[in-house]
Image (cartoon, rainbow, N blue to C red):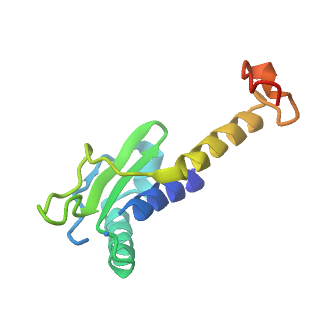
Amino acid sequence: MKYILFIMISCGVLACNSSRKLNRSVQPVTAADKVWNPANVAAFEKRLEALRLRYNIPSLAIGIVNEKQLVVQGGLGYADMKKQIKPDENTVYHLASITKTFGSIILMQLVEQGKVSLDDPISKYGINLGGR
């Protein structure tokens, strides 16, 4: 879970550059109450804002999911600097080739679950690479 959070934040950092407070909504969930309470969310927001400003990142989207429940969501900076449009749940970020990272994580999770083996030929999973 920590790795997914790190990747989500990294994607936002890589995609963006700007300044403002996080529009956050916190919906506490059982075990997450201790971690994602308003005080901790505010501290997390402060650290992200400092990083965003330090690295001149205009916009950053944040979403934290715990046990299939969205516990924190929001954005920092501006999705459009010229028009001063703040990021929201509909803001689209260009991720470039970062999707390979997501694909690798998903594959390794399937390996951990025993659903896929790295030693199997790829054709076992219905993928035909034309004689390769």
Give the answer, above or below, for where 7 lies relative to 71.
Answer: below
Where residue 87 sits, quadrant-wise, is bottom left
* Most foreground residue, 75 or 2: 75
The quadrant in which the C terminus is found is top right
Where residue 112 sits, quadrant-wise, is top right
Give the answer, above or below, for where 38 lies relative to 50.
Answer: above
Where residue 36 sits, quadrant-wise, is bottom left
Task: Provide residue 71's location: percent of width, then percent of height.
Answer: 37, 47
**Total marks in image:** 0
Give the answer, above or below, for where 68 lies relative to 11.
Answer: above
Residue 130 in the figure: left or right of residue 71: right
Task: Provide residue 51's location: percent of width, then percent of height.
Answer: 39, 75
Task: Provide residue 33's location: percent of width, then percent of height.
Answer: 40, 52
Q: Residue at x 45, y 59 (%)?
A: 9
Task: Provide residue 12's location: percent of width, then percent of height.
Answer: 40, 58
Q: Residue at x 29, y 68 (%)?
A: 58
Residue 36 in the figure: left or right of residue 124: left
